[in-house]
Amino acid sequence: MRNIWVIFRKELRIFFDSPIAYIFIITFLAFSNWLFFRSFFFVGQISMRDFFFSLPWTFLVFIPTVTMRLWAEEKKIGTIEVLLTLPVKNYEVVGGKFFASFIFMLITLGLSFSLPLTLYLLGEVDFGPIIGGYLGACFLGAAYLAIGLFVSNLAENQIVAFIIAAVLSFTLFIIGENIVLATIPSSLVPLLSFLGLGTHFTSLQRGVIDTRDLVYYLSVIGFFLFLNIQSIEARKWSQRISSSTNLIFLVLIVLGFLGIINYLASRHFARVDLTQNKLYTLSEASKKVVNRLDDIVNINCYFSKNLPSYVISTKQQVSDILDEYRAYARGNIQVKFIDPTEDPALEQKLRFMGIPQVQLNVMEKDQATATNVYMGIAVTYEDKQEVIPFVKNVNNLEYEITSSILKVTRKEKKTVGFLAGHEEYSIYSDYQTVYQALRRQYEVKQVPAQTIPADINVLVVAGPHQLTEQAKYEIDQYIMRGGKVIFLIDIVTVPQEGGIRATYRETNLNDLLENYGVRVTKNLVLDRFNMLITFQTGYTILRTPYPFYIKVIKEEKGFDPDNPIVNQLNSMVFPWVSALEPLKETHQDLQFTVLVQSSRYSWLQKGIYDLNPLQEFMPQPEDTRSYPLAILVSGKFKSFFADKEAPPPPTPEGKEQAQRPPIIKQCEKDNQIIVVANARFIHDNYADLPGNVEFFLNAVDWFTWGKDLIGIRSRIIMDWPLPFLTERQKSTIKFINIGGVPILVALFGVIRVYFRRKRTITLENLK
């Protein structure tokens, strides 16, 4: 160990005594940080995902630059023979050089600390993927260093060493990527995917520390260091054929040993999920659901054997997730993977079950062809069955599986009704995304306003116009009986052809809502935190911030931190939303929870509704404050018709007028309603915006299952939006990171080189 330490110190000192090392560090930092900030503010996410995406490719150039001199320079100046005749072992020389270059790489990588520090100062950030990304970068960089060190020993000069090391590192990185896997036989895909350096880096970059990835990287590093040691030894007996033969056998033995180690690691592994919301670990809600199972649930995964290369990893990820389900189910979950293509009768059965063959594109012999595959899942309990027709990716798979288990094991069927008959949004044309999401867990139907069936668990009133007194009576009595209602209210009608003037939309619902403690104002809310929109004016296409598209973000206290409906959301967008006013003074017996509110930089547009995106949005500072956008009201509601005459019941033509049952004047037990000052946010045009659909589905789940599903769905939202920044602030951030840190490194280098040369001159003068 002492010899390794001596060589380590010598090599590290050589690095930092040379101006080239500082040029290397400065160039690496400036280039990497410039690549990161090129899209950072445009994407608008507090994340280092883009930095780690480009880092492996940056390493392919910079790390061979570090390693190319480690042996080649020794050969050039003729010191390698002297080094090898010293009383040190080969592994000590290789170890000293490797650890010196590794520490140099760590210092260089560590100087990018300004990036996570900047993100932390900008707002809330998930440090799990950042820690995982840096750890992955350390292992990937160490693998590149081991490769470069080995190549440097074989090459006669530095340029050749650089080129061969870069090409070999690139080859080992790219062989596991989809661009290569798509061109090879499917039988080789699992092997090459495992051998690819990039495959394991991607896993760590997500924020998941998997022992399989660590063992793989240690194997690659150890193997190339072993080759380096043996190549040094081979110089001593380069003409002896028997020794060369022994080396080949020794290399094969080491490869076999490492193969066995990695096989065992793949069978017995551990994973640590560093992400803030534990995105890649089974949630507590799912654990509780499967732990409560009283009988066996069968999960059959129908996957074709010959899948295209770019979806093979999906099958493995599905298997990993289901292993976790089995671990917590106490033997009550059984999982099978079945290839339907081997059984024509099974294929016909799957078509009736709703699991179709899906056509995917593959590359064969430089041509794009189509192949039909199965990638579906069936969850069965007793005589009930739910299917997931096609597993496109695993981002939402936990929610799909857990909701399917709930649906087949729950004795009661929950129903969500959407009020119809007053120009409300339709679940079949306007809310198709929400409709499809709800159908996975609920019975969903439209409800006529004449009478609300007793089997409706949650009623949604979405954007009504001119609600009749009969409809108001039915809604009121439904609430008095303990029914849950979600009111989604639009106060303006926006021209579909893109006009810049909106008109007031009369809902005839305000008096009913005010009876329950909430007033919907006739003002539109604007906010400095908003979305960029693209629109055309003449022949010009413009992209500009649009304050009418409010972006609610967690960092601006936009969500109630204590309510499960919203406390795991990071952002959502409301287009043309009005403000709500809780009437606390006149309804002191009710409890009000502001679920969602605008930022403190929002203001109101009163009177006319001018939607022109080119107008000047210049609010006065004293006019800006937060406004409630969604409110949860709880308590024993009093009927709107408690002291009014109820409207006559609807009577079919030709029949006598029916008698109404007595009016229920107050809820017997505490009840809840949710009022949202917008109905467009879950329209299909806006359903793909992060948080929008999730907020609505969480509200439905809250009124039906409670907390069972909310935590699962909300944690898949990976939106960490940037706060509002002026152009000057953006320029300052760019300068500090792209120029400031490299300038500090340059100053340190100049000072160190100056004092080193001064000391050298002093020593020479003393002689």
Image (cartoon, grey):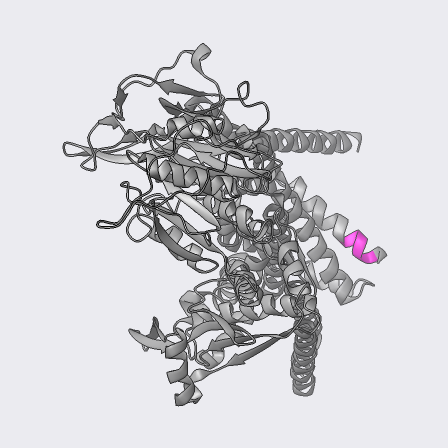
Residue at 62%, 65% in the rendered image: 150
- Compared with 487, 293 (above or below) is below
Q: Residue 469, image x and y in percent?
A: 33, 34
Frontmost residue, 508 versus 493? 508
Q: Is residue 103 left or right of residue 680?
A: right
Residue at 38%, 40% in the rendered image: 681
Q: Residue furthest left?
A: 538
Q: Is residue 360 left or right of residue 57?
A: left
Q: Which residues are magenta?
A: 3-7
Q: Residue 246, image x and y in percent?
A: 69, 85
Queried whether the magenta region covers residue 759, the answer comes back as: no
Residue 679 in view here: no
Q: Residue furthest front?
A: 656
Frontmost residue, 569 versus 540? 569
Q: Where the N terminus falls, by quadrant?
A: bottom right
Q: Is residue 370 left or right of residue 473?
A: left
Queried whether the magenta region covers residue 5, the answer comes back as: yes
Q: Residue 555, image x and y in percent?
A: 55, 31
Residue at 55%, 56% in the rendered image: 64
Q: Residue 696, image x and y in percent?
A: 46, 44
Residue 308 in view here: yes
